[in-house]
């Protein structure tokens, strides 16, 4: 409550920030700033808020959907990487070179082209030049970067924090104005409760007030089987397990709810989103894990955090350090409808190219 009250004091700064964002969007809308389209299928995954809506698992969902029938690639900014400019992941790439999320894509889908570049307008032609067989590019977290005009924009908003109920930074978490949602072709309400009713669904759709060209979907988080970070051995932890949760993600709430319902107890070491783990963190993790007095204890982390902890394999290989994978699962039996909408978009572009 105190934090919320403090953020209300920041409202004047939000109005200033909002004015700047509104002006920028107006300049793009009036073509003073150019949004460049490509005669090529670009799928943009993004949100209006700062982090926490499930962009990374949505990109992975799209990769799984497309990779067997299309030569797909991902393009990310590479947030918090130690390099600059354009790059494509290879067998020697590290998370420090391309960022944690692109590294996660690369490790899980080694046959898919994973590229990074701050200037997407420049990076897209570079990617197509180096990988001329590419048939579709998934732009990760690019909705607010309007210099490139994607053909299919997928906007994510969290069930418990819809953009319609949020406010601009710094008083709120929005980095773009609400009306920008109208640029999306698809809106996905993520992290829904599994038993969301039709009545609740209709109320949310009414609140989002989609335009005629927009389709609204709903997903829940689906957790997979935990696997050891280094050996990849899978386990199913029991209700007697005592967990040390180590995470540096924007919105750990659903993960905490998942553990509360499934294990005996858990303690959490929480770090900032995209935190780069160092030797001091390693010492803290070992110290906190040692304090847990249980014969059935383990360390659990997210896939994004696991990528950033790979460098400590020598120090942690013998620890019960497990990663919990997540996926989007569509509600109301609408996965097939979403999949077909994406595939139809790509095929439409392919026909245009084939017919000149």
Image (spheres, rainbow, N blue to C red):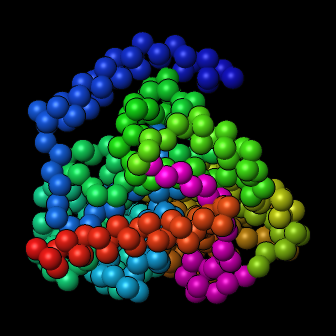
Asked if the magenta segment contains residue 300, the reply would be: no
- Dividing the picture into quarters, in which one does residue 282 lie? bottom right
In the image, the segment drawn in magenta is 214-235
Query: Which residue is pictured at 47% across the width and 57% down the height?
Result: 55
> For this rendering, which residue is in front, 166 or 286?
166
Residue 355 location, x and y as percent? 14, 77
Q: Indicate the quadrant containing the C terminus: top left, top right, bottom left or bottom right.
A: bottom left
> For this rendering, which residue is in front, 219 or 256?
219
> 69 left or right of 223?
left
Query: Which residue is pictured at 47% across the width and 78% down the height?
Result: 64
Q: Is residue 294 above or below residue 218?
A: below
Q: Indicate the quadrant containing the N terminus: top left, top right, bottom left or bottom right.
A: top right
Residue 126 location, x and y as percent? 13, 68
Asked if the magenta segment contains residue 231, the reply would be: yes
Residue 127 location, x and y as percent? 18, 71
Residue 161 location, x and y as percent? 60, 38
Query: Which residue is pictured at 61% across the width and 58% down the height?
Result: 219
> For this rendering, which residue is in front, 137 or 311?
137
Q: Is residue 276 above or below residue 69?
A: above
Q: Is residue 32 above or below residue 205?
A: above
Query: Which residue is pictured at 36% across the width and 23% down the height?
Result: 18
Say if residue 285 shows up in the picture: no
- Dividing the picture into quarters, in which one does residue 174 lie? top left
> 63 left or right of 150?
right
Q: Is residue 149 above or below residue 227?
A: above
Say if residue 56 shows up in the picture: yes
> 230 left or right of 145?
right
- Dividing the picture into quarters, in which one does residue 318 lie? bottom right
């Amino acid at each position: 409550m105190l934090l919320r009250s403090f953020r209300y004091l920041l409202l004047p700064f939000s109005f200033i920030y909002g004015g700047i964002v509104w002006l920028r969007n107006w300049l793009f809308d009036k073509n003073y700033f150019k949004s460049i389209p490509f005669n090529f299928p670009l799928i943009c995954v993004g949100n209006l808020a700062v982090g926490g809506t499930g962009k990374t698992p949505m990109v992975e969902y799209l990769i799984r959907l497309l990779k067997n029938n299309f030569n797909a690639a991902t393009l990310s900014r590479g947030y918090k990487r130690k390099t600059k400019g354009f790059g494509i992941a290879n067998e020697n790439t590290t998370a420090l070179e391309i960022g944690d999320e692109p590294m996660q894509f690369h490790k899980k889908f080694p046959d898919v082209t994973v590229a990074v570049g701050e200037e997407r307008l420049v990076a897209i032609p570079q990617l197509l030049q180096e990988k001329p067989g590419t048939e579709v590019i998934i732009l990760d977290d690019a909705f607010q970067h309007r210099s490139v005009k994607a053909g299919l924009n997928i906007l994510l908003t969290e069930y418990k924090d819809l953009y319609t109920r949020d406010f601009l930074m710094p008083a709120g978490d929005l980095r773009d104005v609400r009306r920008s949602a109208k640029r999306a072709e698809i809106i996905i309400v993520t992290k829904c409760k599994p038993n969301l009713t039709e009545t609740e669904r209709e109320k949310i759709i009414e609140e989002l007030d989609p335009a005629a060209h927009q389709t609204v979907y709903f997903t829940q988080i689906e957790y997979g089987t935990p696997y050891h970070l280094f050996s990849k051995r899978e386990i199913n932890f029991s209700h007697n397990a005592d967990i040390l949760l180590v995470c540096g993600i924007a919105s750990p709430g659903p993960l905490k709810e998942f553990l509360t319902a499934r294990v005996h107890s858990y303690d959490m070491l929480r770090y900032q989103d995209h935190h780069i783990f160092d030797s001091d963190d390693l010492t803290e993790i070992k110290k906190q894990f040692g304090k847990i007095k249980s014969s059935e204890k383990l360390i659990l982390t997210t896939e994004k955090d696991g990528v950033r902890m790979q460098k400590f394999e020598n120090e942690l290989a013998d620890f019960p350090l497990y990663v919990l994978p997540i996926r989007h699962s569509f509600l109301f039996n609408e996965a097939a409808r979403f999949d077909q909408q994406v595939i139809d978009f790509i095929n439409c572009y392919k026909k245009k190219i084939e017919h000149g």
